[in-house]
Image (tube, rainbow, N blue to C red):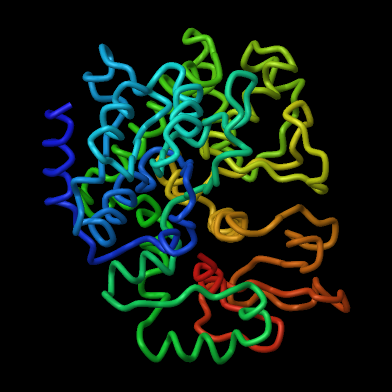
Amino acid sequence: MQKLKEIFRKKIAYTQTSFVRGIMDEINWDARLIGIKGSRGVGKTTLLLQYIKLNLTTNLQSVMYASLDNIWFSENRLIDFADVFAKEGGKYLFLDEVHKYPGWSVEIKNIYDDYPELKVVFTGSSLLEILNAKADLSRRALIFNMQGLSFREYLSIETGKKFGIISLEQILQNHESLSSQIVSQIKPLQYFSSYLKYGYYPFYKELPEVYHIRVEEVINLILETELPRLRNVNIAYTQKLKQLLFIITESAPFTPNISKLSERTGLNRETMLHYLHYLNEAQLTSSAWKSAKGISRLQKPNKVYLENTNLMYSLSSTEPDTGTLRETFFFNQLKYKHLIELSDKTDFLIDQKYAFEIGGKNKSRKQIGDLKNAFVASDNIEFGYENKIPLWLFGFLY
């Protein structure tokens, strides 16, 4: 355990806090049990270490961080680790990569029930099952989902300027004045194309020249390690998952034809629908339906997008389609806090209330016609007018 303490102290010493993700302020850190889910590479570990450094360094003796993929846990139980920590006066326990530890949910449940003096925060894969038969954590834990950098956060890193989160309602009502305030400080379009290409995963700053190679590594680890471990996907079928992902990439937004997909991949209908669902859960794709009510994993999505625009550049052998890039960006930034569905008359319907058409700077408002609460999200413009809104501004929603 002493070795784990040394690793923790070293990590804290090297943790930078010049930029902190917006989700830091959304989490109720006073809760006794907090879970943070998210795809590989979105910054979960950094978030934990930054919170400790910013809020708990005055009494580090009562704080412990450990990654459960550490070899120490191959011969030591988590519950025993927590017991020793509590008896030494511990109060705050931060557990990273819990999905790497067999039976993690049962032991965390036991820690929560048997050590009321401990506050526990854990992170894990976006595939993490919080509700299961052995240990239902859904009634005990506050769960937060974390995704990659928003355009707002990317701008803060690149420019050093702090921009606040803007709600969808504020954008719809005051986008002209909001755009003016932001453009008076920076030129958003100067950074927008770069964000679409390599600004989503926080590690883009570390080695920019190999960024897309690292993104491909993230994809492979999800397909080859996390899905077999967390969804019992036969390791022999991971190549089928890769094939399915590349088929989606070739024609995103992809309209699934299950019969043709089954024929092309050799998978039966039910397995195919499960795999589409798993890719969505793993935050590699985003499935869209005309109605998102009562969606089950065995219901075919109407369209499938890649989860973010950076994946489009990493997976595609050609330059991604501009229209698809715009739609993917809009879908990604909106789905974090809003219900997003496909619409018969426009591209998207948000929260079953707001209709959106996505396009370039010359996109007219003709298609939305006399529709109520209808808007155009337009690329390559700094300022909008009436119900025509700059596309980049929707990158300030989180």
Left or right for 54, reference 390: left
Q: Give 248 or 195, whichever is nearer the viewer.
A: 195
Q: Where's residue 295, x and y in %?
A: 78, 37
The percent position of residue 85, horizontal first and vertical second, equals 27, 33
Image location of residue 48, percent across then percent down: 32, 48
Q: Quadrant of the N terminus?
A: top left
The residue at the point 63 percent across, 67 percent down is 359
Residue at horizontal 35%, vertical 42%? 41
Left-right relation of 328 to 189: right
Q: Nearer the viewer, residue 4 or 365?
A: 4
Relative horizontal placement of residue 23, taking residue 256 as reference (left or right): left
Identify the image quadrant of residue 64: top left
Is residue 307 or residue 142 the one in the foreground? Answer: 142
Please report the residue visible at 26 percent of the width from the left and 75 percent of the height from the top.
160
Instruction: Give the answer, above or below, for where 99 lies relative to 354.
Output: above
Label total for image: 0
User: Which residue is at a point 75% across and 61% down the rendered structure image?
Assistant: 351
Quarter of the rendering containing residue 66: top left
